[in-house]
Image (cartoon, grey):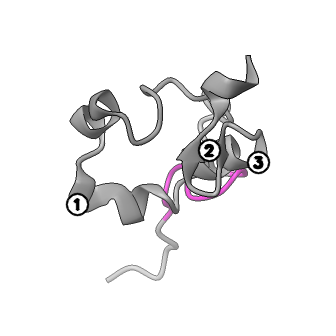
Amino acid sequence: MSDEPVWELDADPDSANWIKAGTWDLPPYLSPEFFQVIPLDQLEWFRTTLTYRSAVAKGLIYDDEWVADYLK
């Protein structure tokens, strides 16, 4: 095995795809359409992603609920 580090793309803001960093291009969080893209059994993993964390930081998701539609 190599001693080279293994990079996980999009693991943090520094390694994120800069074009998509901080954008939300998914259906509304926890909607039926959302679960067609992110299956329920991957929801815990999804909550660790930059996409989710950015949406929380921007106020699109609050207390693990989609609130972006209410912000309009």
Q: Which SS type dominates the magenta stretch?
A: loop
The Cα atoms of the two marked residues, 3 and 2, are separated by 16 Å
Q: Which mark is residue 57?
A: 3
Q: CA distance from mark 1 to mark 3?
A: 24 Å
Per the image, the residue denoted by label 2 is: 16
Q: Is residue 53 above or below residue 22?
A: below
C-beta proximity under 8 Å, tags 1 and 2: no
Q: Could you tell me if the residues under marks 1 and 3 are in contact, i.e. CB atoms within 8 Å?
A: no
Q: Residues within 10 Å of mark 2 (few under 14, many from 20)?
A: some
On the rendered structure, is 20 left or right of 37?
right
**Residue 53 position within the rendered picture, expressed as x and y whole percent measured from the top left:** 64, 52
Taking 4 as reference, is 50 left or right? Answer: right
Q: How many marks?
A: 3
Task: Name the residue located 64 percent from the left edge and 50 percent from the top edge.
Answer: 15
Q: Secondary structure at mark 1?
A: helix
The span from disc 1 to disc 2 (Cα, nearest Å) is: 24 Å
Check disc 1 and give the amino acid type: Asp
Q: Position of residue 41 (x, y in %)?
A: 23, 60
At x 68%, y 26%, the residue is 70
State which quadrant residue 63 falls in. Answer: bottom right
Q: Amino acid at mark 2?
A: Ala
Callout 3–callout 2 Cβ contact below 8 Å? no
Identify the mark nearer the N-term, 1 or 2: 2
| Numbered badge on residue 41 | 1
Q: Which of the two labelled residues, at mark 1 and mark 3, occupies the earlier sequence position?
A: 1
Please tell me which of labels 3 and 2 falls first in the chain: 2
Mark 1 Cα shell of 10 Å, populated few (<14), some (14-19), many (≥20): few
Looking at the rendering, the stretch of residues picked out in magenta corresponds to 7-14
